[in-house]
Image: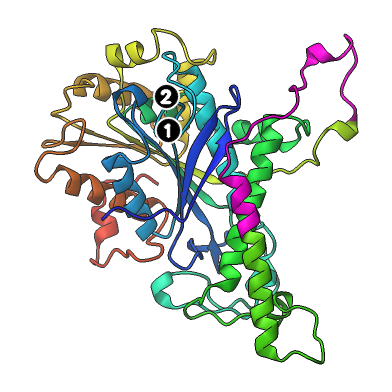
Amino acid sequence: MPPIPTYQFYIPSLHDETALACRIYSFPDLYFGGSEENEATGEKQWTPRGAVVAHPYTTLGGSYDDHVVLAVVEELLKLGFTVGTFNFRGAGKSKGSCSWSGKAELQDYISFVGFFMYYLTNVFPPIPQSEYFDNHYFDDQYALAPVISGTPTARPPAHLILAGYSYGALLTRYLPIVPVLLARFSKVLKSSTEAQIRLRASALADVTRIDILNSPLKGVRRTRREHRARQPPISSSSNDTDHAALAKARSADQKKQLMQLLQKPFVRKEKRDTWLDEPLGMPAEEEDFTARVDVPTPKTHYLLISMLVGTVASFLTGFRKLSNADMSLLDKKFTQNQSLLVHGLKDMLSSPAKVIDWFQAIRGYDNGVCAHNASDEGGHFWREPGAMEMLRAEIRLWTTHCIGGGAMIAMEEEGEEELSPYNVN
């Protein structure tokens, strides 16, 4: 049975404000993440984990309901990630149609990654951990934060996996590095699409925080501060039960209003502001911009499954360049961050030999931390006997080695780390 999305909603594309259908899958109790050692203090601290998965080519039936995409989502959920998926334009419930060049789809991808990181940061702000989780404890099975003691210290940066399957992996190649991508959203015109994406990320984060406060969290002891924040003003005519019920009703109403906003495709009511509307040489005023909000740069990882290369890739992008940037510079992100390339040797859509040649070429840039695994039995669609099981196992092993066991999966065999093919540190 495929995983069930926690939230379904729309965001506008940066390309032309086409409405993109999106999903967020979150860890069962909404406290997703894992514990990690703080480099400054040596203490174990909790840090969020997020992943974005891009689907295959729209015109050939690709969507976020693809069986490989859902398998990746399921495996990452077990490892404590919150996972985001989206439909490129023309796929599923997304509006518009395939661009045949890939440039619009690349902007769709950038739109969702920007949304996702602002969402994740708004749900769990980068404040000192002892302030946010003071006096909390978590069951070991969730692999979350232990009781915090000592001087407050900043939480380690979030982990982010950018994953793509087939056409989605091809577009992942063309993504700018994450700091450059996020800089586009930091300070923007209030009338811009970027501002609307940030607004929707903040709204969904509010919904998530409401769900966290109203959920029966297993093994969690709330702080007094959290408890007070959930209660309405005390009146002499109400008892404690009434207060809790009223607070829950109020938050439920707020959640309903926010989700109604998010589940409607964005339609601009007024003409979009452009530089053509301003007299030449007339810059925008400071009051026209949003407040600057910088998202802390996450520890980024890349997962490429059955990536398209060669003639097929060129055909699906209209034999055009998707970016003016030097491809060797774009590909360096795979060797400068923990990355995994997985493909099947029976792939009839994308030449395994060309995939291996590409991998060897990027490894030659600086012989970094990009790993490669080829399945003898796997084809492009991973429907061969045993192929999907192999793919799932590779994702678990690589993610566990790079990031840690997380929520529900742990490497139980002694000596597994020594035998892992991903020992690249």
Q: Which residues are magenta?
A: 256-285
Q: Which mark is residue 365?
A: 2
Which image quarter holds the N terminus?
bottom left
Residue 284 counted in the magenta span = yes
The answer to the question of whether label 2 and label 1 lie on touching residues, with beta carbons closer than 8 A, is yes
Residue 422 against residue 127 in the figure, above or below: above
- x, y percentage for residue 221? 57, 82
Residue 396 against residue 12 in the figure, above or below: below
Viewer-nearest residue: 150 or 238: 238
- x, y percentage for residue 217? 50, 76
Disc 2 or 1, which lies upstream in sequence? 1
Asked whether, in this view, residue 180 is left or right of residue 328, the answer is right
Q: Quadrant of residue 227?
A: bottom right
Task: Give the residue type that dot 2 points to.
Answer: Tyr
Viewer-nearest residue: 1 or 316: 1
Asked whether, in this view, residue 109 is left or right of residue 152, the answer is left
Q: Residue at x 62, y 31 (%)?
A: 180
Most common SS among magenta residues:
loop
Q: Secondary structure at mark 2?
A: helix
